[in-house]
Amino acid sequence: KNKKQMKIHSEIQVVSDISNFLKDYFIEVNNIYLNSRKIILIRHSKTLLNDGSFLGQKRDPSIDDTFEFNKKIYDLVFDDYKTISSPQKRAKETLNHLGIDDFQLDDRLKEFNYGKAEGMFFDDIISEFPFIEKDIKNQLDFRFPEGENYTDLLLRMNDLLSENNDDLILLTHQGPIRAIIGSIIELPIHLWHQIEIPYTYPIEIIYLNEIPTLNIDRKKFRELFKNFEGM
């Protein structure tokens, strides 16, 4: 009987120890999170020109008022962050739709400069600028004619981030967000265009020991990288 009681007592103690360990662990993780620098990346709401053609800087459409925002964006407490937006209409109007008017504008958050490819569809671009298809096959970071490449995009984004030590909300576009995420996870640059950035979904980056880390759940991670399945 005593041995049985001792065994039960020992098992209860183990459960208690594990429970205390987990409690302390989650407190520590929460403290690390609260004290970490945070960057929230948000792609603007959808426009009628997000139709598969290359929508960059030269065209500046308004957002589609019928598009439903992602529910997660309404959970953000904008007062806890410094908000910076692309000066393009679709970014500013996304913030206006949320009732946010306290934000700065920065040209470095603009979408890709697609140069002569602005407004064209991919097949037409390949036909008119065959060097692009060659660069793609050679896994190069090709530059759009009279426009940018992903290296240019990452340079201007990193330039902006290096100037700001605050917790930030950046209202921007698919290209800049792809560049930041691709850089963080060390994805080869010729694959960045395959990252899928959903409209109006807050994507959090946290800095752990000054190292940026993607902080999203598995479901959203699979959505961002769905084009990589089977590769």
Image (spheres, rainbow, N blue to C red):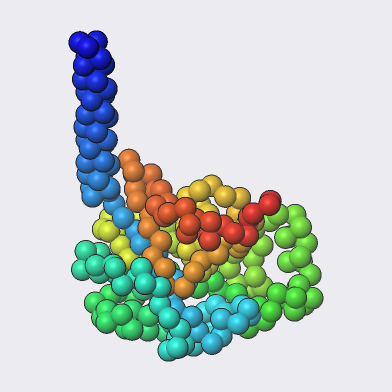
Q: Please provide percent x and percent y for residue 32.
A: 26, 43
Residue at left 41%, top 48%? 213
Whether residue 181 can be seen here: no
Q: Please provide percent x and percent y for residue 80.
A: 21, 64
Specify the quadrant of the image occupied by residue 1.
top left
Q: Along the horizontal axis of the image, is 11 left or right of 190?
A: left
Q: Nearer the viewer, residue 5 or 103?
A: 5
Q: Nearer the viewer, residue 109 or 204?
A: 204
Q: Along the horizontal axis of the image, is 189 left or right of 94?
A: right
Q: Please provide percent x and percent y for residue 208.
A: 34, 43
Residue at left 50%, top 73%? 111
Whether residue 145 can be seen here: yes
Give the residue furthest to the front.
1
Residue at left 53%, top 56%? 222
Specify the quadrant of the image occupied by residue 195.
bottom right
The answer to whether residue 67 is above or below residue 160 is: below
The answer to whether residue 26 is above or below residue 82 is: above
How many numbered marks does the figure carry?
A: 0
Specify the quadrant of the image occupied by residue 94.
bottom left
Residue at left 36%, top 68%? 72
Q: Please provide percent x and percent y for residue 138.
A: 75, 54
